[in-house]
């Protein structure tokens, strides 16, 4: 079959210019019969499938039955179930034609964002492990928060995805922004909540900020597409070619990169985030006068080994608090232990696992305290004074014990 262009050329050469069919056939490399048919045809050639039932139509009821029970079943699985042996591409094309009747497409609306209305939040887990102690490496999450109106990006690495660390990371970034949006948008992150139920501590955090934390329904990535695009931008523009000596080094490099990232021109807004953030911030709420409770807090009785455990790491405490209840609080950087309103230990938080962090002053205090205890126990003997001993018969008479043949009777 000749093309439409060849058909037009043949008719022009033969009818308009009078060229013979023989010369046209030689020029195009086709037979004279093809040239004759093209000259005689009043319309360009068009491929038409022969009428009649195809093999697809014969098994279409089976395809529909499978799609009715499972609308998302892959075409390859359907082909196997119905015994299709023809062209896989032709089968997929027909399944794609039928599937929308049972699994309608989910349209995504274009959303406009008002200034100050929302900040979208998400976690990114960069590839590659980061050193977090001698011979130890881990993958840490990066909290990313983006102002939806201005596209202004805020981010920092945090020790874990637990509720305390997520709230502490959010508060630090909002404090740096200097304002609070009306909504903080999350997906179903476990540390924030699941199944329309916020995790412990999250409602109080939102209450202090006078904001609302919104968790999106599953399979709705478009509703937080702003932060998803920011995640991709961070992974393709910040991470490639960089190495990090520690989490602190990661955050230092990230802090140096973000100002330039927020000066980029965003196509959808036609502006630069660093210039549009002013309107976003002006429409937001002010920071609360009292900071919200974030991080990890607990109250435990200090054991004899004078260590407390925070996030799988052990931290030393002043041994004077042994046997007493101590208050333990950890934020992103510091672990602080206190009792009776006094500091009993302050440590830099370790981001590793299974580590023991010891203050030499606590070890020395324990040595002095142990020596004093041992001396106090040995004092009666060393003083040369005879300790007064009570006759055991006094206890027998007091409790009415009578000895007969070596037996103790009540």
Image (cartoon, helix red, strand yellow):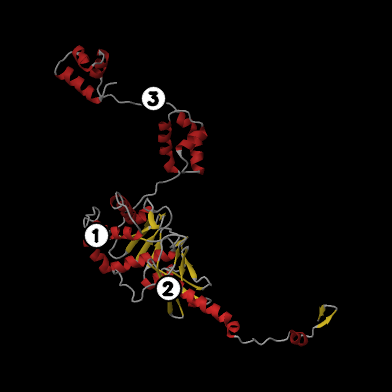
Q: In the drawing, does residue 39 fall left or right of residue 134?
A: left
Q: Which residue is mark 3?
A: 50
Q: Which residue is mark 2?
A: 361
Where's the N terminus, which quadrant? top left
Residue sitting at the far front = 384
Judge whether residue 154 can be spotted in this image: no
Depicted 384 relative to depicted 226: above or below? below
Q: In the drawing, does residue 15 fall left or right of residue 164?
A: left
* Dot 1 alpha-carbon crowd within 10 angstroms: few under 14, some 14 to 19, many 20 or more: some
Q: Quadrant of residue 337?
A: bottom left
Secondary structure of the residue carrying tag 1 is helix
Depicted 168 relative to depicted 390: above or below? above
Labels 3 and 2: the sequence-earlier one: 3
Secondary structure of the residue carrying tag 2 is helix
* Dot 2 alpha-carbon crowd within 10 angstroms: few under 14, some 14 to 19, many 20 or more: few
Judge whether residue 401 can be spotted in this image: yes
In front here: 222 or 387?
387
In front here: 310 or 72?
310
Q: Which residue is mark 1?
A: 259
Labels 2 and 1: the sequence-earlier one: 1
Q: Quadrant of residue 101?
A: top left
* Dot 3 alpha-carbon crowd within 10 angstroms: few under 14, some 14 to 19, many 20 or more: few
Please give the name of the residue rendered at 39% of the width and 60% of the height, measured from the top-left corner. Answer: 186
Where's the C terminus, which quadrant? bottom right
In front here: 314 or 312?
314
Q: CA distance from mark 2 to mark 1?
A: 42 Å
């Amino acid at each position: 079959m000749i093309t439409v262009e060849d058909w037009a050329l043949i008719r022009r050469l033969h009818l308009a210019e009078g060229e013979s069919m023989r010369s046209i056939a030689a020029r195009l490399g086709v037979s004279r019969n093809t040239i004759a048919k093209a000259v005689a045809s009043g319309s360009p050639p068009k491929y038409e499938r022969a009428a009649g039932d195809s093999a697809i139509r014969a098994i279409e009821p089976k395809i529909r039955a499978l799609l009715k029970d499972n609308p998302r079943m892959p075409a390859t699985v359907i082909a196997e179930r119905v015994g299709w042996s023809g062209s896989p591409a032709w089968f997929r094309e027909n399944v794609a034609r039928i599937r929308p009747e049972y699994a309608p497409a989910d349209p995504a609306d274009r959303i406009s964002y008002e200034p100050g209305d929302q900040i979208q939040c998400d976690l990114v887990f960069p590839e590659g492990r980061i050193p977090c102690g001698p011979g130890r490496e881990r993958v840490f999450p990066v909290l990313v928060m983006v102002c939806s109106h201005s596209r202004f990006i805020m981010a920092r690495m945090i020790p874990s995805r637990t509720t305390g660390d997520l709230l502490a990371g959010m508060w630090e970034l909002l404090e740096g922004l200097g304002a609070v949006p009306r909504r903080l948008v999350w997906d179903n992150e476990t540390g924030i909540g699941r199944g329309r139920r916020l995790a412990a501590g999250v409602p109080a955090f939102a209450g202090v900020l006078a904001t609302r934390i919104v968790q999106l329904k599953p399979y709705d990535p478009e509703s937080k597409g702003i932060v998803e695009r920011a995640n991709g931008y961070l992974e393709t523009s910040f991470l490639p070619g960089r190495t990090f000596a520690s989490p602190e080094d990661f955050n230092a490099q990230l802090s140096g990169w973000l100002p330039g990232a927020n000066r980029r021109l965003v196509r959808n807004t036609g502006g630069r985030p660093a210039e549009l953030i002013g309107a976003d911030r002006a429409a937001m709420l002010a920071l609360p006068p009292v900071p919200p409770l974030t991080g990890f807090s607990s109250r435990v009785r200090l054991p004899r080994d004078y260590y407390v455990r925070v996030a799988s790491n052990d931290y030393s405490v002043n041994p004077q608090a042994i046997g007493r209840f101590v208050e333990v609080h950890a934020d992103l950087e510091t672990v602080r232990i206190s009792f009776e309103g006094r500091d009993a230990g302050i440590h830099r938080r370790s981001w590793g696992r299974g580590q023991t962090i010891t203050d030499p002053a606590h070890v020395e205090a324990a040595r002095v305290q142990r020596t004093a205890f041992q001396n106090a126990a040995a004092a009666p003997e060393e003083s040369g004074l005879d300790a007064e001993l009570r006759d055991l018969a006094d206890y027998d008479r007091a409790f009415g014990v009578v000895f007969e043949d070596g037996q103790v009777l009540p």
